[in-house]
Amino acid sequence: MRGNVLVVAGLLLAGGAAVRAESLAWTRAHELYQRTDYTGSLAVLVGSGEQDAAAFLLMGQDYYMLAQYKKASDFLEKAAALAPQNAECFLWLGRAFGRRAEIANPFTAPGYASKARQNFERSVALDPGNREAVGDLFDYYLAAPGFLGGGTNKAAALAAQVAQRDPAEGHYYQARLSEHGKEYDSAEQHLRTALELAPRQVGRVIELAKYLSAHGRSKESDALFEQAEQIAPEDPRVIYERASAYVSSRRNLDEARRLLRRYLQAPITPSDPPKAEAESMLRKIGA
């Protein structure tokens, strides 16, 4: 972190609500979390004995990243209770319940799924500009059946709201809706429009490159991945997604191995795909 860490870490703002995090222990734990050392981050927090919303939120994130979703939801519920106006608490609580739904038995999964939706909706209501919360809620609406509160009509309404704030992001959501409806020409056009509106956002380039690769247009896809690398040559997302596209299409596997090994050596953050996924891909292609 830059500057005085106590000043920087003094207030975490989300949805207009403050979560205090002024201790050196929290700052150290957060630095470890950002370096994906979730076990180390937890050890610092547990050792500190802190029991405020910021500590519980970070502990919940650590447990989530370690795939201990029950513990994650327990701590995130504590964080949300202490900071009921904080959108981040409800976003991560929704994620934890979503993961619990994925691995639960058929009798308990619907309840966890509904809790995931409710928390995503609460997060978006508290902070409509939170891109991650909006994205997770959109994913839920698009994937979940109506009896669990999902539906393409809800996803479309959310996409329209996004378009008002961020036209490029709105076209990305429209592309997702079109692809879901098997309207592939429309999906591609929306992705291209998103890229035209935000040509320097590397994520826009990656999404179109991935789409074209998945539809067998490898030369166009490769050209876009080259463009993405020129924009952000050291961005781990570019390395990972290009390798993933090669593995999925069973082409350029030697290059995929090189890229995956490079990814495993790169410094990543919690926002990047876990290195375990890169290792899994390497095993898949016999590396």
Image: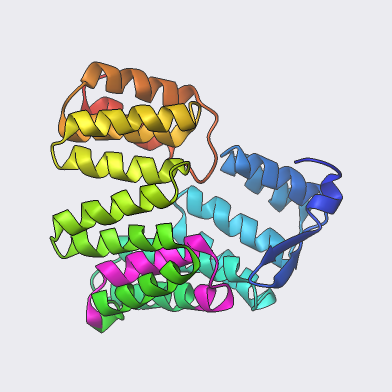
Which residue is located at x 42 percent, y 52 percent?
A: 197
Which residue is located at x 41 percent, y 57 percent?
A: 168
In the rendered picture of this protein, how many numbered marks are placed on residues? 0
The magenta stretch spans residue 132: yes
For residue 145, what is the image quadrant?
bottom left
Q: Is residue 47 visible?
A: yes
Q: In terms of secondary structure, what is the magenta stretch mainly?
A: helix
Percent coordinates x, y for residue 154 in the rendering: 32, 78
Which residue is located at x 43 percent, y 21 percent?
A: 262
Left or right: 205 with respect to 41? left
210 shown above or below 67: above
Percent coordinates x, y for residue 193 in the rendering: 33, 53
Q: Nearer the viewer, residue 286 or 165?
A: 165
Tell me which colouring the rendered structure shows. Answer: rainbow
Left or right: 88 with respect to 264? right
Percent coordinates x, y for residue 18 in the rendering: 74, 69
- Residue that extends furthest to the bottom in the rendered view of this protein: 147
Which residue is located at x 40 percent, y 33 percent?
A: 228
44 shown above or below 158: above
The quarter of the picture where the C terminus appears is: top left
Q: Which contiguous range is marked in magenta?
A: 122-146
Q: Nearer the viewer, residue 208 or 67?
A: 208
Q: Is residue 281 visible?
A: no
Left or right: 164 with respect to 206? right
Q: Nearer the viewer, residue 34 or 152?
A: 152
For residue 59, what is the image quadrant?
bottom right
